[in-house]
Image (cartoon, helix red, strand yellow):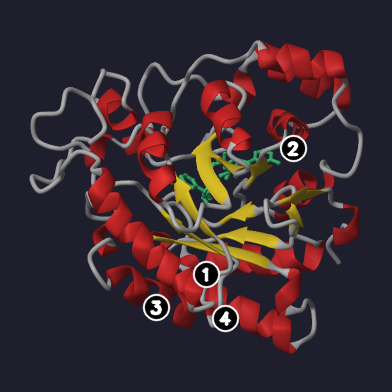
Amino acid sequence: MAETINPNLVPKRKLSTGEEIPCIGMGTFGSDRFTPAQVSQAVAGAIRCGYRMFDCAAVYGNEDRIGEVFAEAFREGAVKREELFITSKVWNDMHGQGDVLLSCAKTLRDLKLDYVDAYFVHWPFPNYHAPGCDGDSRNPNSRPFSADEFMATWRQMERLHDMGLVRHIGMSSMTIPKLEAVLPLCRIQPSLIEMELHPCFQQQELYEYVLAKGITPIGFCPIGSPTRPERDMTPEDIADIAVPEVVEVAKAHGVHPAVICLKWAVQRGQIPIPFSVYENEYVSNLRCTTEDPLTEAEMAKLKTVERNCRLIKGQVFLWPGANDWHDLWDENGVIVT
Ligand SMILES: NC(=O)c1ccc[n+]([C@@H]2O[C@H](COP(=O)([O-])OP(=O)(O)OC[C@H]3O[C@@H](n4cnc5c(N)ncnc54)[C@H](OP(=O)(O)O)[C@@H]3O)[C@@H](O)[C@H]2O)c1
């Protein structure tokens, strides 16, 4: 029988609405390495062990299998629907008028739910690439960020919220210039924003900006996504779990460096969503939020590990005429329109 962590012992975060959500969730992107059956089996195990938040997405290609797991968990009384915080995301090829609603309807059907707790715009572009494509592939129809286009998508997100199909709406992989362009136009503000956050990529400025707006940050790739697809790897990338300071703190606590990345994330204040299909890993990832916190000195040491090392560069979404992946993040002086 797997170890169970009492969900009541897992710290909570407060959304701007006052609602509490767990300080950690489980990711469900199998990185092209794990089948939907393996990922959904991990979700089943994670519910049993005490996870109450799951980060899903249509593009992960496994929502139908994960939906079977949720249905079974509710049927057998392992957990009640209202005890789970389930998120999903609309993929880039479904930003068109009416498509966001269709995409959400499919997600709800696949997940076998009446509503999701949060629904995200997965990327702020309608730029699409085929699943599993290599890192050099480009779509000639791709185009730069447009606030008008984004807002047309957001209006559909707001409608979903009005209809009660999604309890919160959120954005993902945004930058300060993009947020400055769209937040004043939102009738319903995002409750949550997903952003890449790990010790070697702390995005301090964006992180503080988001908090100041009353938005809760969710940190993806919290362990530095050591097994991400090859298209997302470059020779310059730094492995968080191999950085000497992280390894040193891990030794002091007698845990894997991955666990230190998560303790750092939770104590800093973002909600990490680590992925693993291995029971020993996902159990320790949840348990670490309930015991043996990092000291202030260790938190200060981990702060110095920042290397501005973005792992998910998104180069497959670049448009004709773009310089390089920095354009996607408004780092080449690109003006947001
Ligand atoms: N919004 C977005 O655009 C976006 C982008 C990327 C990701 N995400 C979400 O964020 C989630 C997490 O990101 P990610 O999966 O890329 O990366 P991650 O969580 O940083 O890393 C996952 C890998 O870390 C290793 N790991 C996990 N727990 C461990 C432990 N206790 N000890 C040792 N190793 C451990 C596992 O490798 P092994 O399998 O080798 O053990 C696992 O495959 C995704 O699943 C997805 O839900 C969202």
Residue at the spot 40% in from the left edge and 52% down from the top edge: 122
Q: Is residue 222 visible?
A: no
If the image is split into quadrants, where does the C terminus sit?
Answer: top left
Q: Upstream in the sequence, badge 2 or badge 1?
A: 1
Assign a secondary structure to mark 2. helix
Q: Is residue 40 left or right of residue 14?
A: left
The residue that label 1 is drawn on is: 37
Q: Is residue 203 above or below residue 133?
A: above
How would you rate the neighbour count of disc 3 (Cα within 10 Å): few for under 14, some for 14-19, many for 20 or more? some
The residue that label 4 is drawn on is: 68
Q: Upstream in the sequence, badge 4 or badge 1?
A: 1
Q: Upstream in the sequence, badge 4 or badge 2?
A: 4
Q: Which kind of residue does numbered mark 4 sit on?
A: Glu
Label 4 – label 3 distance at C-alpha: 14 Å
Residue at the spot 52% in from the left edge and 69% down from the top edge: 37
Label 2 – label 3 distance at C-alpha: 32 Å
Could you tell me if the residues under marks 4 and 2 are in contact, i.e. CB atoms within 8 Å? no
Ligand 1 picture quarter: top right
Front residue of 152 and 328: 152
Q: Quadrant of residue 89?
A: bottom left
How would you rate the neighbour count of disc 1 (Cα within 10 Å): few for under 14, some for 14-19, many for 20 or more? few
Assign a secondary structure to mark 3. helix
Could you tell me if the residues under marks 2 and 1 are in contact, i.e. CB atoms within 8 Å? no
The residue that label 2 is drawn on is: 266
